[in-house]
Amino acid sequence: MISASVTPPAIDLSGVRLEIRALQPQLVEWRRRLHQRPELGFKEQLTAQLISQQLTSWGIEHLPGVAETGVVATIPGSKPGPVLAIRADMDALPIQELNDVPYRSQHDGVMHACGHDGHTAIALGVAKYLASHQQDFAGTVKILFQPAEEGPGGAKPMIAAGVLANPEVDAIIGLHLWNNLPLGRIGVRSGPLMAAVEMFEAHILGKGGHGAMPHQTIDAIVVSAQIVNALQTIVARNVDPIKSAVVTIGELYAGTAKNIIADTARMKGTVRYFDPAFEGYFGQRVEQIIAGVCQSHGASYELNYWSFYPPLINDAGMAELVRSVALDVVETPAGVVPECQTMGGEDMAFFLQQVPGCYFFLGSANPDKGLAYPHHHPRFDFDEIVLHVGVEMFVRCVEKFCVGRADRLSGGSLSAHSMATMPKGNSKPSQ
C-alpha cells in the first residue's frame, strides 16, 4: 500500500463530518495509486479495474465497460425518489511528469496533470459512504466514472450508451479540483461556467521562390501573418464587447531556409465563447477572413474547422443547491466564489445539455506547500486535504436533493432521521 500520511490541514474542516474525515487516508491512497498509473482517454483499463474492485467490495451494483472504459455505479436509497448523477472523469494527459514525489507517474509520458485522479478518488469516497448510509436518502444516486474528458471526449459516448436512463436521471453534478482557487474555496455560479471549445487547422498555399525575387512568388508567410492579424478583428469588431470570446492561433509553421520564400504555411488555432448563440458563427467568420486574405494575394487555402465541446451552462436551481451546500461546508460566504468563469472547456457540458445540473470548482492550490502549478503543467499537483471536502460536498448535495425532492414529490413529511441529516443553513451534519 502506498503511504498516505496526512499533513495538518491548512483549512477549516469543521464543516466535514467525522465519518467522512476518517475516509481521508483511504482517499489519499486511492488518489496516489491512480496518480502512479495514469492512462490516456479510452485506455483507462487499470483505473476502471481499481474502481470496479472497490465497488464490488462494498456490494455496489455497477456496470463496467461503458463507452469502452467507463464505469457506472448505482446506489439506491431507502425508498423511491429522484435520481441524481455524480460525474467523475478519470483520464490523464500525454505529459512527462517532473514532480519528485513518491507517487509520481510510473507510465512514461503520461501524467495526471489536471486532477482527474482526485476526482476519481472523491467519487469512490462518495460511493463508499453512500453504500453504508442508504437510509439517509431517497431515490437513487448514479456515479458516472467517465473516460476521455481530455480528448476525444467520453461524455457523448456515455450518453449514447444510456447512462442517463434506466433509471432516468433527474439532475447531475460534478466538480473540478481547481488550482486557480485558494485551498478550500468553492467556485459555483449559474449560467455559463466554462467555454465552448472549437478548433481549426488552415493550410495556406502560395508559390515559393528565391528571397531576392519576391515578385515571382506568392509568399505564404506574408499571407499567414495577415490572416493571424485579421482573425483578431473577429472578437475586437464582430463580437458585442459585453460578451466574451477568444480566437487564438497557437501554432504556425512555414519556411525551410532564410533565403527561400515559403510556398506553404500551416496554422492551428482555437476559438472559445460562452454564448450558445455563437454556435456556427466563428467557423463561418474564420473561413471568410482566410478566404478574403488569400484571394487578395492570389493564394489558396484548405481549412478544417470543428466543434469540440459546447459551453458548459449550469442550471440556476442546481447551482443554488450547490451554493447552499457550499455555505454549509465552508461556513463563510467568503469561501464561495460566484464569479469563477474560465475559457477552458469541459465535456461535462454534454451532460448539462441533457439534464439540469451544476459543475463547480473546489480550490486545491496551496502555495505554502509548493502546490500551485497550473493545470496541464508537468509539475501540477494539489493539496490532498481537499479530497474529503469534495466527498462532503457531494454527500450533502445527495442529502439535500434526494431527501428534499422526494418529500416534495410524495407530499409527505420528512422522517425524523432525514430531518437530522439534511443540512439547513449553517447547521452541522450528524457525526
Image: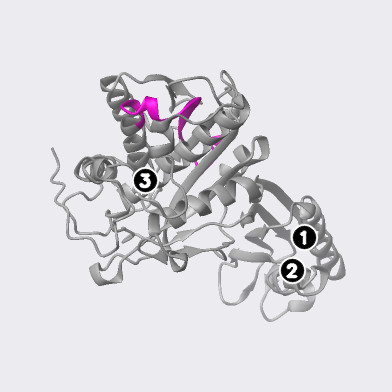
Report the residue that reaches farthest toward the bottom.
212
Amino acid on which the number 2 mark rests in the picture: Leu
253 versus 38 height, above or below: below
Crowd tier of the residue under label 2, counting other residues whose Cα lies within 10 Å: few below 14, some 14–19, many 20 or above: some
Residue drawn at point x = 66 percent, y = 35 percent: 354
State the residue in front, 62 or 139: 139
Name the foreground residue: 61 vs 381: 61
Query: Which residue matches tag 1?
Result: 286
Q: Is residue 256 left or right of residue 47?
A: right
Please give left or right for residue 257 compared with residue 298 in the image: left
Mark in the foreground, 1 or 3: 3
- Asked if the residues shown at circle 1 and circle 2 are in contact, with their CB atoms under 8 angstroms apart, the answer is yes
Q: Which residue is drawn at the image coordinates 63% and 47% (left, top)?
A: 317
On the image, numbered disc 3 is attached to which residue? 392
Q: Is residue 318 magenta?
A: no
Q: Is residue 7 above or below residue 31?
A: below
